[in-house]
Amino acid sequence: MVSPELFRHRLQSSEPRQAIQSLLRRIKAERVGIAVADISICGAIPPYSVLTGGKLIAMLLASPEIAIAYSRKYSDAESIIASSIAGRAIVRSSHLVFLGTTSLYGTEPNQYTRVSVPCEILGGAVGENIRYSPLGRTEGYGTFHFSDETVDALSAAIAEHRGGKRVNSIFGEGVNPRLRKVRDGLDLLGLDSDQLLMHGNQRLVYGVPLARNFKEYLLGRNLEPDYLFALDSVEEYTKKISQWWAERWLAKRIEREDILNDVARHSLTYPIRHGARVQVPAEEENLDLPFSEFARSPLGDS
C-alpha cells in the first residue's frame, strides 16, 4: 500500500503522472462516457411550470423506467470511436448509474432544489433517497452569449483559413464543437478567447446517483451497479413517482389562489391565451400563403 505522501511525491515525476492520466482516460472511455448521462434540457411549459412540473420531470428522469429504457437502447450499440480504433465492433456495458445537470441560473431555490424520491416507493431500501445533490458551480465559461450569426461567421473564417475544412459539429470531433469554433475563430482574429468566453453567468451543478456503488462502478472496481431501486414493475414505479410529486409539491401549490389564477389565464379556446404558444410576428400573420384563399371558404369560393 502506497501512502498518500509517497503517491503525491511520485506524481511529481512525468512518467507516473502520464501513467495515471492514461489510466483515467481508459476508465472514462470504459465507463464514464456510457454510464453517466447529462440532462441538457429539463423543464415544464406554462401552465405546468407554476405547478412545479419541472420537478416532476426531474424526478422521472431518475426513475427505474428511464434506467431500463437507457440500457435497452444502448445494450447492442457499438462504440463508434472505440470500434474505429480497434478495427472491430466494441460494445460497452450500458448501465446508467449517474445523472448530471446544471441550473438555469446560479441561485437557489430553483427547479432542482429539494428534489428527491424515497427509494422505498421504488422497491428500494427504507431511508434511502434518490436526490439532486448540489456539487458546486460552473466557472461561467461558454458560448451562449455569442449569436448564431457570430458563430457562423467565425466558422467561415476558420474554414477559409484552413483551406475549406470546417468544424461540422458531428460526433467524434471532440467535446463541444461550438466552443471550439468560437475559440479558434477568436484566436484567428487575434482576440483573447479565454477572456471573451468568460461570460460570468455561473450555474449550480447537480449530481444524481442512481446506484449505491456508482463510484466503484465508474472506476471499474465493481462489474455491476447496485441500484437504489428495483428494476421490476418499472411502469408502476413511474406512477408512484408521479403520486409522490403530487403529494409533495402539487397539493401545496394548488391551495394558493394566485397559482390557480395564473393557471386559469392559459386557454386553448379562441382567442388562444397560452404561455407556451409560439407568437408569430405580425408581418408573418399577413403573408399570402399558398392556397390561403381556400382556407377562407370551406367550398373554395372567392
Image: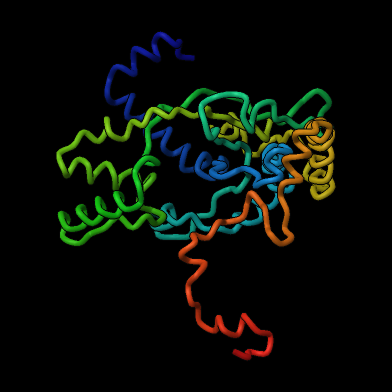
Give the side of residue 125 with respect to residue 113, left or right: right
Residue drawn at point x = 66 percent, y = 55 percent = 72
Q: Nearer the viewer, residue 126 or 247?
A: 247
Q: Residue 241: give x, y in percent of width and height.
A: 79, 40
Residue 134, compared with residue 9, is above or below; it is below
Which quadrant of the structure image shows residue 190? Answer: top left
Q: Residue 160: give x, y in percent of width and height.
A: 17, 58
Residue drawn at point x = 38 percent, y = 27 percent = 200
Q: Residue 88: give x, y in percent of width and height.
A: 44, 60
> Does residue 123 appear in this view?
no
Residue drawn at point x = 38 percent, y = 53 percent = 172
Q: Residue 57: give x, y in percent of width and height.
A: 69, 43
Which quadrant of the structure image shows residue 63? Answer: top right
Give the side of residue 121 with respect to residue 94, left or right: right
Residue 42, compared with residue 214, is above or below; it is below
Residue drawn at point x = 76 percent, y = 39 percent = 261
- In which quadrant will I find the C terminus? bottom right
Q: Nearer the viewer, residue 214 or 302?
A: 302
